[in-house]
Image (cartoon, rainbow, N blue to C red):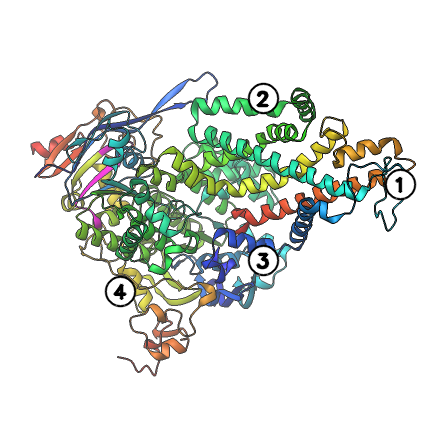
Amino acid sequence: MSEPLLQVSDLKKYYSLKTGKLFGGRTTVKAVDGISFELAAGQTLGIVGESGCGKSTLGKTIIRLIEPTSGRITLDGEDFTHLTGAELKKARRKMKLIFQDPFASLNPRMTVKDIIGENIDIDHTYATKAERDDRIREVMEMSGLNLDFMDRYPHEFSGGQRQRIGIARAIVLPPKLIICDEPVSALDVSIQAKIINLLKSLQREMGLSYIFISHDLSVVKHISDRVAVMYLGHIMEISDKASLYRSPQNPYTQALISAIPKMPGEATGEKIELAGDIPSPADPPTGCCFHTRCMHAMPVCSQEQPELKQVGPDHWCACHLCKQCVSV
Amino acid sequence: MKKKNGKDNRYRSYYQLSWDILRKNHLAMFCLFVILVLVFIAVFAPYLTPYEPNVNKARDRFQSPNPEHPFGTDQFGRDILTRVFYGCRISLSVGIISQLIACFLGYFIGVCAGYFGGKTDTVLSFIIQVFSSFPFLLFAIAVMFILGPGLVNLYIALGLLGWTSTARLIRGEVMRLKNSEYIQACIVCGGSPLRVILKHLLPNCVPILIITVTLGIPNAILSEASLSFLGLGVSPPTASWGSMISEAQPFIRGYTYYSLFPGLAIIITVLSFNLLGDGLRDALDPKLRS
Amino acid sequence: MENNILEVQDLSMSFFNSHGELPAVNHVSFSVKKGKTLGIVGESGCGKSMTSLCIMGLFPQPPGKIVGGQILFQGRDLTKLPAREMHKIRGKGIAMIFQEPMTSLNPVLTIGDQIMETILLHEKVTKAEAKRRALEMINLVGIPMPEKIFASCPHQLSGGMRQRAMIAMALSCEPDLLICDEPTTALDVTVQSQILSLINRLKNQLGTSVMLITHDMGVINEMADEVIVMYAGQVVEQAETAELFAHPTHPYTIGLIRAIPMLDTEVEELNVIPGSVPMLYELPEGCLFAPRCPYATDKCRSHRPEITEATPGHSVRCFRYMSGWEGE
């Protein structure tokens, strides 16, 4: 494998929160707690997890919309973590973000043209207005938007079209990496399919890398090359997707996959029903963060936090049980 | 949203839509018309009457309304209609200019407090609290006392007084907006805070500003009247509605017209602005629309 | 038909505004059998939620108005009942749970108070008795420590717990029909599977019939006995669940099923349905699906098909299955 496009090592984001008590002081919420992974150029890493697992925070921390507490982000061989000013602006050109809510992510007072062109305006990439507008037309066509829409306002569009505008905005100055934060969760099934197809075809044409954050395992499976499963700020399992879906090692991944309502024709294994809710990130369990709901919990699980261990050619898993998998 | 607004509206901008809604509000449109007439009067006052506002004519004292003087004359023989017209200039300019000052101050301080947050917010919010806890009239009197009477000072005094509510509204709106994803998108592609404030936040705050200015103008007009009534507004013999009522005070029993017409003018103006403000609020508020 | 607890016959509900009549629910007929689950599936704006609100008499009125048809609940026509009678049916006869449990619970009252309120409203019991019943219900929906939850306010609970509390409230008067409007859309996968199995368990335990509204084909497959597919206010296909998935007939149903990324199969590109759902004020003249349908003929574009039985127990609204079809 050549030099990875993005390298994240031991990334942490802690929030300090006031506790509700009168003299309670503060607690720390570990939204992202020691995440490491690599992403090769042209690849897609899917990040799945339930709400509150820190997957969105992770996405925003990577692009430094939220400043990380510690850890290191290397983008294209350059340490992205401590860049400031003009250098940060320059490095951010390689990285873009697509948002979940197509209704909140477009400024209602700006025309489509200005929304897409904002990036160009900030970077002064094109000398003349004609060149700028030509480029806007080009990306609108690439994103499947009708050119008549240029001077309209976002409220005139449906969710799918708005999401296309968001995509056009992200690719107007060709980036290398796009972080997609639940880009299809707010859309209907048939529109979701169109947006996913668009993202895939753009990836082929432009050689983009994606970090695709979603709670939907089937969508993530469809679009990703590798998948990471997150729970309470930790990566529980990360693997190439074939191996992850075929033989999930972590009990949490197994439960997650079994919990998806299946369509006819999909293998319905034994349903694993997890007891209880996701613990609050402000008060995570000791040891393995999943042990409170895990059906295989052992005494060691509540004391010691498991490390990510290699269990297959490109398959890492953080679980005390997995030690046994390897030794077998 | 589209279900109710229908097809035609899909190709219109936010302000065109708002205008469509406002146009259907007959009361607000009537008020807008009244305000335009008042503006016309204020601008063209010298051409609308044959009299001078400040020239005494002892011969014509205390005339009741008659064809020559439709509103009658005052104790110096000045035409009341003329003085009401010239007073309109003062009142409208005081209302509009002081509120523009207030709006500018309010937006700037509110945006800084809301957008930067943290210590900036604490300090600015404290200033807002301090300013808004002064009794309105006392503060105005104090400022006018320090600056001395006069039109420009009146603008400044009322402008300094009116910005707190704007700032508070803007601060709240900005705190809500600053986490929206389009602003994050702007930051991610390298937009500076100035760009965010001018390009993203300002257009989204304009409706609030329009409404606060429209509803602030009548307050300013009333305050001007009160201050002039107390002798702290414009200096005599300049005509302003407040000072006219003040001068009419001794004659209120014997010669009611003197206080009646400026009083009516104040009521009509204030009412028009208030009703138009209500209409604008209905038209501009996206929550009421969808 | 003694077996049907709810029969909706030719129901039409329209909104009236400056654009004239907008048919939100368009000649909809279906029935819910005693102790069975009827699934209603469709994308946003297809009228599935409006149909349920019509049944509850809770649609916005005006601008909405029922313009035709009957809703027979235990032999009584709900469209003609006076408001007082309708109050008695809501909660006692038919109960409903919504997508977002946070907005459907009163934030300032405790969970216990809200459940007791429902019981006290419909039944002549003492407060103590109502409290006992409420605790029993909380216990029944699988909430640990019922007393603690009884005294908590909604914001103190997690999303899954709130939805359980909603279900406890809905079932507290043992309604004959439970309408679930996207009950798990706001929840995480693992919690969703808990709630779905809870609904199933209670259905069997209490003999309640369920009307389940969702956009998720997987949920339908796992929960429903019978399915109707809605599109633009109309029922386009109706069949038993196994039959529908084995032989989807309407082009829209086929497109919808194919647009979902499957866990087990690997495709490069997802199937999409061209175009988008028409707005109510710009419905096409002929078949509502004709502009997006790959099989559409001139007849489809000029005439509206009726819903007809293609095979026994399987109805579809498409000319291809009506006698006299001349296409390929």
Residue under label 1: B60
For disc 4, the neighbor class at 10 Å (few under 14, some 14 to 19, many from 20) is few
- Coordinates of residue A88 in the picture (x, y in percent): 26, 32
- Coordinates of residue B250 in the picture (x, y in percent): 87, 30
**Amino acid type, residue under disc 1 in the picture:** Asp
Answer with the quarter of the image where residue C243 lies.
bottom left
Query: What's drawn in magenta, residue-wise?
Result: A223-235
Q: Secondary structure at mark 3?
A: loop
- Front of the two marks 3 and 1: 1
The reply to whether discs 2 and 3 touch (Cβ–Cβ < 8 Å) is no
Q: Residue at x 7, y 31 (%)?
A: A327
The label shown at residue B130 is: 2
Residue under label 4: C246
Badge 1 and badge 2 in a common chain: yes
Badge 3 and badge 4 in a common chain: yes
**Amino acid type, residue under disc 2 in the picture:** Val
**Amino acid type, residue under disc 4 in the picture:** Ala
User: Nearest the camera: B108 or B63?
Assistant: B63
Residue under label 3: C61
Does residue A283 belong to the magenta stretch? no
Answer with mark 3 or mark 4, whichever residue precedes in sequence. 3
- Gap in angstroms between the C-alphas marked 1 and 2: 51 Å
